[in-house]
Each structure stands twice: as C-alpha cells, then as structure tokens.
Image (cartoon, rainbow, N blue to C red):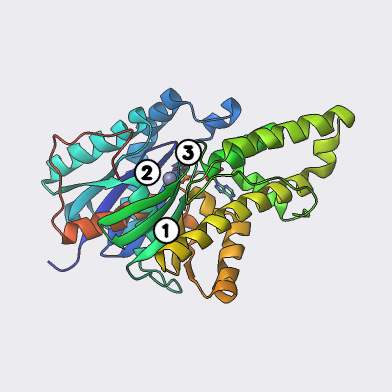
Amino acid sequence: QNEVFILAIESSCDDTAAAVLQNDKVLSNVVARQNIHEEYGGVVPELASRAHQQNIVPVIDVALKKANITKNQLSAIAFTQGPGLMGSLLVGSSFAKSLSMALNIPLIAVNHMHAHILAHFIDEEGFDKPTFPFLALTISGGHTQIVKVNDFFNMEIIGETTDDAVGEAFDKTAKILGLPYPGGPLIDQFAKEGNPKKYSFTKPKIAGLDFSFSGLKTQILYFIQKNAAENPNFVEENKADICASVQQIIIDILMDKLKLAVAETGITQIAIGGGVSANSGIRTTLKNAEGKYGWKTFIPKFEYTTDNAAMIGIVGYQKFLHDKFVDQSTVSKARIEF
Ligand code: KG4
Ligand code: ZN
C-alpha cells in the first residue's frame, strides 16, 4: 500500500477539528469553533469539553465526506496527546482510541506544539518546505518558543517565555481595551488602520533567548488607566493607534530574539507557527526579513496557523512512515515533555 490515509483529530483547547490527509496532502480540514467562551472572556474548560463531545462526531463525518473516503480506507488515526486542557484532550483521544480499535488500524499520538512546527511539511502549492535544521518560532495562546528543529522527531527548545505567552499578551491587551475574547485577531484588524509609532512601550529586559510578556501587559494597563483618567473616551478615540503600537512592540520583541537566535545558531531558515502567526504585522515583518537580513522565512497558509487537525495529520503521516505508533494504554497529557 503506497497511499497512506490518515484521519487526524485535534481537541486540545476550544476548537474541535478533524482532517484527512492522503500522504502529505490535505484532503479535508474541518474546524468547529466554540463561540461560547466569548462571553466569559476566556476558555472555560468544562464548557470546552462538553462542546467537544457535541461536535466531534459531526466534525469527523464532515471531514471524511469532504475527503470523499470511507472509514475503511483509513490507514491510521492520529490525535493530539497534549499539551492542552485535560477534559478537551480526553474527548479526542477517547474517540481516536475507539475508532482505531473498531477499524483495527494503528493509533498515533501527536504533540500539539510539534504539529504547529511541522505544519510546514504539508504539501501545498506555492508553499516551500524548510530543510533541516531550521528555527521555528511557535507563538500561540499558550506558548512562545524558539525551537531548533533538527529533524521530524528531534527538536530542542532554545528559548521560551518565562511568564505569559505572546497570544496572552494580545488577548489580555484586547480585554483591557474592552474587546471580546480572543482579542488577538481584533487587535490585528484595528492595527491595520493605526499608527504603530504613536505610543511607545518599553521592551522587557530579559537576557538570552527567553521571553517575558507579563510586564508589557502591566505597562499597557497602566498606560490605559492613566490616559482614561484624563479622557474617558481615550480608548475609543485612539483604538487603532493603540492596537498598532502594541502590535509593534510585540513584533519588535519577537524580532530581537529571532536575530539573536540566528546569531547564536548560524541558522537562517525561520519558520513560524501557532495561532499568533496569523497576525498580519508579524507575517509582513518576517517576509521583509528575507531581503533585509538574508533569511529564508516560512509562513504557513492561514488555515494552518490557528489550531487545526491538518497539522496533526502531517505529523501522523511522518510517524506512520516511521512506525511510531501507540497502543490503547496511552494517556493524554496536559503538559508534555518536548
Ligand atoms: O494556536 P492557537 O489557535 O491556540 C493555542 O494553542 O493557543 O492560538 C490562539 C491564539 C490566541 O491568543 C489568539 O488571540 C491568537 O492566537 N491569534 C492572533 C491572531 N489570530 C489568532 N493574535 C494576533 N493576531 C492575529 N491575527
Ligand atoms: Zn495551538
């Protein structure tokens, strides 16, 4: 059998996702987003797992239908083992386990953070694949890491956040500005209309390749409180400029660390991944870095940036080729060794 069909399931946080891959090509990629969390200003774990339970069967059905294949054609089932919310992970893993048992096909456990990085190996027209070794900047709601990727299954974290993730910096700023959760995409939208040089914020003083974003959040909070005390309409009147300036300082922080990582490793191929890599300012800055610094940068197709199952499927495919399977006794992990 030289065609491999993988059904991939992702349920680590608040999106229920399923995808079908034929080798390294995506046949279908379905995501059911949970809007329920908006009114709470963040993901409520109990509500997330309940919504996963409701969504998982229809999402998988749609993924198979769109791929135009039947369950019996599947070669293996891949699922997200962690990191993530335990109650959410368990819905995906239990479903994957029972399906693999029912169909008598192998089961593959995937690390969500590896998947954000390896999404670059999905075969897509117009998208180059990096060659090993390369550097990956993974930026999401839960993580901020610089990873040296030596091979599909050999990666080292060379820098990471010591407190908040960059996605949290976006989301918490949005909350301060009175925007709904998740606010990252909204900041991106407003920033497009604003002046990134209007307000300046200071970068955290943190040595080496590690990051810190909690100080920036506090700085922004005080800045807003101070200005709103003088003018209650400050945020409304200057929303675009505030968003553009906040986005700019975050981009500057990320770029400083990437430049340092390139200097330290001598590697000039940079791939980004994770939900925050959907940010248009970050995408443009990285594209421009090719001409500016001589890097080769890899920016994923938009639908593979925020949580999705296609990225789980591409890791599943690589693991399938290398016989990296798990059995029914495998457990979900809220935290997972890299
Ligand atoms: O990878 P992801 O979908 O889920 C996690 O594993 O965390 O990332 C979600 C994060 C959220 O913090 C969201 O606000 C942020 O990605 N995000 C963005 C944009 N799109 C999503 N942040 C800034 N600009 C965007 N366009
Ligand atoms: Zn993610």
Mark 2 crowd level (few <14, some 14–19, many ≥20, 10 Å Cα): many
Q: Measured from the top left, where is residue 84 in percent x and y?
A: 37, 36
Quarter of the image holding residue 166? Answer: top right
**Residue in front for this viewpoint, 327 or 242:** 242
To which residue does mark 2 refer?
Answer: 59
Instruction: Give above or below for 243 relative to 50.
Output: below
Q: In this rendering, does residue 179 appear at all?
A: no
Quadrant in which the C terminus appears:
top left
Horizontal relation, residue 278 to residue 142: left or right: right
- Foreground mark, 3 or 2, reads 3
- Residue at left offset 54%, top offset 41%: 212
Q: Which residue is mark 3?
A: 162
Q: Earlier in the sequence, mark 3 or mark 1?
A: 1
Residue 136: assigned label: 1
Q: Mark 1 belongs to which amino acid?
A: Ala
Q: Are there few (<14), some (14-19), or many (20+) residues within 10 Å of tag 3?
A: few
Q: Would you call the spot at circle 1 few (<14 residues within 10 Å), some (14-19), or many (20 or more)? A: many
Q: Position of residue 283 (x, y in %)?
A: 57, 61
Return the residue nearer the eye: 263 or 74.
Answer: 263
